[in-house]
Image: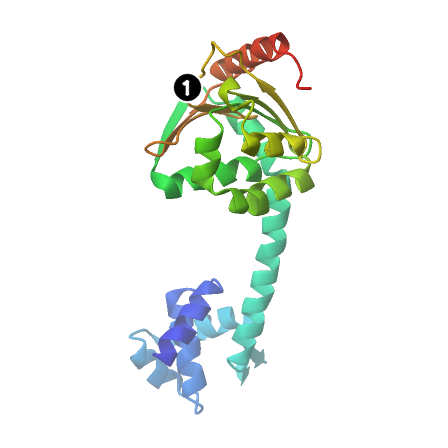
Amino acid sequence: MKVNILHQSLLDLGLSDFLAKLYTELIQDQELNITKIADKLDTYRQRVYDGIEELEVKGLVERKRGQLSNIESPSKVIRLLNQKISGLEITKEKLAEALPTFQASYFSNRKTPLTQVYQGKVQFLNLFYRTLEESEQNDEILIYSEGRDFYNLIDMPTYYESWAVPRVQKGVLVRAIFKNEFENDKYFINFLKRDKQELRTSKFLPKDNLQPGTIWITKNRVIFWNTLIPQAVTIEDKQILDFQKANFELVWRSLPPLD
């Protein structure tokens, strides 16, 4: 079992299966019997010598005048793994910073619309949080919202801690249009009082216009949310996106600001 853990760690470092097995054999065979190791690995002696040369490149063995002089302790494997993890974290952070640019290029060059369906609460919430991950400072999310049903589903305490607060820290703006039936709702009155501090501007639809469902318009997609199932449908298409943005702006300009 312990040998398997070492073997998997070596694979995670990018070694081939053969090199992982060879290193494992080398640390167990202190006599460095190349013929014996070749027999165990079901290969020929020259392949073992070539493998030792590759392990030297990886920093796991040392050679002098072409001869194996030192085999690094397995603790070196942990140090190399830590270096790789640190490097991956740095790469991940840089990619996250550049992601909005790549996403914009990806969607602007897409030739055919992409429609995806997210079913169940887990996928619903994953998409919800993904909208923030893909946004950058001064991006704006446009929202037609049913209101309470949507925020009840995502759980308000979690919403504030995991989405609203990070959104404000990131500088992502929101403009939201809500159903008029919530205008005198105490819950929504408190919600709207935080508009300025949460980088949100809100308006209400007229009483005779009860927009069904919740629609989000982000930089890259239109999202239709159904809180009853729950389910979400996304459309990634520039023409549809531009149409929805224009429609939102027409409605927005027709509505009075909140007192």
The reply, left or right, for residue 49 in relation to residue 135 is left
Q: Position of residue 70 (x, y in %)?
A: 55, 84
The reply, left or right, for residue 45 in relation to residue 161 is left
- Residue nearer the viewer, 142 or 236: 142
Q: Position of residue 110 (x, y in %)?
A: 47, 22
Residue that appears at 38% across and 25% down: 115
Residue that appears at 60% across and 43% down: 96
Q: Position of residue 151 (x, y in %)?
A: 48, 36
Here the colouring is rainbow
- Residue 54 shows in the view: yes
Tell how many labels: 1
Where 3 sits versus 209, above or below?
A: below
Which quarter of the rendering shows the N terminus? bottom left
Residue that appears at 38% across and 80% down: 2
Which quarter of the rendering shows the C terminus? top right
Q: Residue 118's quadrant in the figure?
A: top left
Q: Which residue is mark 1?
A: 212
Q: Residue 98's quadrant in the figure?
A: top right
- Residue nearer the viewer, 236 or 160: 160
Amino acid at pointer 1: Pro
- Give the structural element (helix, strand or loop) at label 1: loop
Crowd band around label 1 with a 10 angstrom C-alpha radius: few (<14), some (14–19), many (20+): few
Q: Position of residue 19 (x, y in %)?
A: 42, 70
- Residue 127 shows in the view: no
